[in-house]
Image (tube, rainbow, N blue to C red):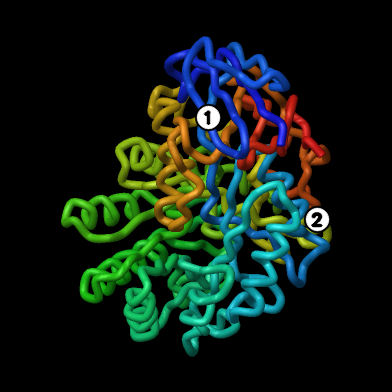
Amino acid sequence: MTAYLITGANILGGEVADLLIDNGEIVAVGTNLETPADVETIDAKGLIALPGLVDLHTHLREPGREDAETVLTGTRAAALGGFTAVFAMANTDPVADTAGVVEQVWRLGREGGYADVFPIGAVTVGRQGSQLAELGAMADSAARVRVFSDDGDCVWDAALMRRALEYVKAFGGVIAQHAQEPRLTQGAQMNEGALSGVLGLTGWPSVAEEAIIARDILLNAHVGSKLHICHLSTKGSVEIVRAAKRRGLDVTAEVTPHHLLLTEDLAASYNPVYKVNPPLRTKEDVEAVREGLADGTIDIVATDHAPHPIEDKDCEWSAASPGMIGLETALSVVQHAMVDTKLLTWAEVADRMSYRPAEIGQIGDHGRPLEAGAPANVVLIDPAVERTVVPAESASLSRNSPFGGMTLPGRVVATFLRGTPTVLHGKPAR
């Protein structure tokens, strides 16, 4: 394995230091480091070094929808975005509701090599919301599943949600809820408000998210388990989670890059690339989720990378599938929305996009500080570069990026997974 000396990097955007990587580990951090004779040097002057990013919410589509994405293409996109680990959602075909399917996804990730893949198991059989899936078997499998979600569908039955929380408590698992009351969102197409009325599109009210979050927080307080809220999107949801954390309850929450930046106004174009679930919300909601991420009410940024083939998006709005790709643009959006606005420092970005998601997902080899003895999962970013997003150039098989044509700051220059470069000079390393 090649040894690498990264010179002159700004560690977490602060002190300038060198990093020596060898044998898959960070050997030393400092200046005037003693290095092996055959070390390869990478000049990182002006670059920021962060621990490899961790995405707790990725759709890799394999098995079943390899026309939209595969584990290989999805993890290549992840590496280009600075991620060294991703959690793959269960809405595959077949659904990842058995030990066999989650092990298949886990092994595909190991073979791909661009990022570690940790499968998320379904909460219910077939994600149908009627009976619990094989949670224990998935937890005991080679994939060692610890996070379970029916994402794309809400576990709307309160009794079933309670049983799921009780079941995973035995092994310290987490239930990640897609908070959407289905009876309040039948036929919903966009955020409910004055604009949905003007556009003639059925509204998705904020209360449909907030009611489920409030219910599940109460259930989790009763059970004493671990609850994670997926893609929180409204001001009211932030306030509910904030109140729960003040009570010391074990609840965590995520926000997506697109909910940090984009608003419902984009739906006026009727361009289905802006159709997503939960929908893009109001400017007030965007400001609230930014504030929630800044003060720690929202624990992490998660991409909800949701690739779709062209035919599922190149159609009328009502027929289009909801979802957006976001692995390659996530860090740039966070820089634009949170760092450049002084709401977060780069050290806090490392917390929200590496340390905390790794902690919630219970993966010890990721989300570690950049220090001697830690696994060499490292990303180098050039924060001064600006780039125009061109969806056709994405490493993903799909092109449904809502940021197409936008100019965003920052570029991932290099990504290392256990000391092996997956990205160098801004391109896949192999």
Residue, disc 1:
27
Is the C-beta separation of discs 2 and 1 under 8 Å? Answer: no
Q: For the residue marked with disc 1, what is the amino acid?
A: Val
Q: Is residue 271 visible?
A: no
Could you tell me which residue is drawn at 58 percent across and 49 percent down?
85
Please identify the residue farthest to the front as the structure is shown.
Answer: 37
Is 430 or 87 nearer to us in this picture?
Answer: 430
Q: Position of residue 179 (x, y in %)?
A: 43, 66
Q: Quadrant of the N terminus?
A: top right
Which of discs 2 and 1 lies nearer the camera? The answer is: 1
Could you tell me which residue is drawn at 50 percent across and 76 percent down?
140
Q: For the residue marked with disc 2, what is the amino acid?
A: Asp
SS assignment at label 2: loop
Q: Position of residue 101 (x, y in %)?
A: 66, 76
Compared with 385, 374 (above or below) is: below
Is 190 or 31 nearer to us in this picture?
Answer: 31
Compared with 369, 381 (above or below) is: above
**Mark 2 neighbour class, 10 Å CA radius: few under 14, some 14 to 19, many 20 or more:** some
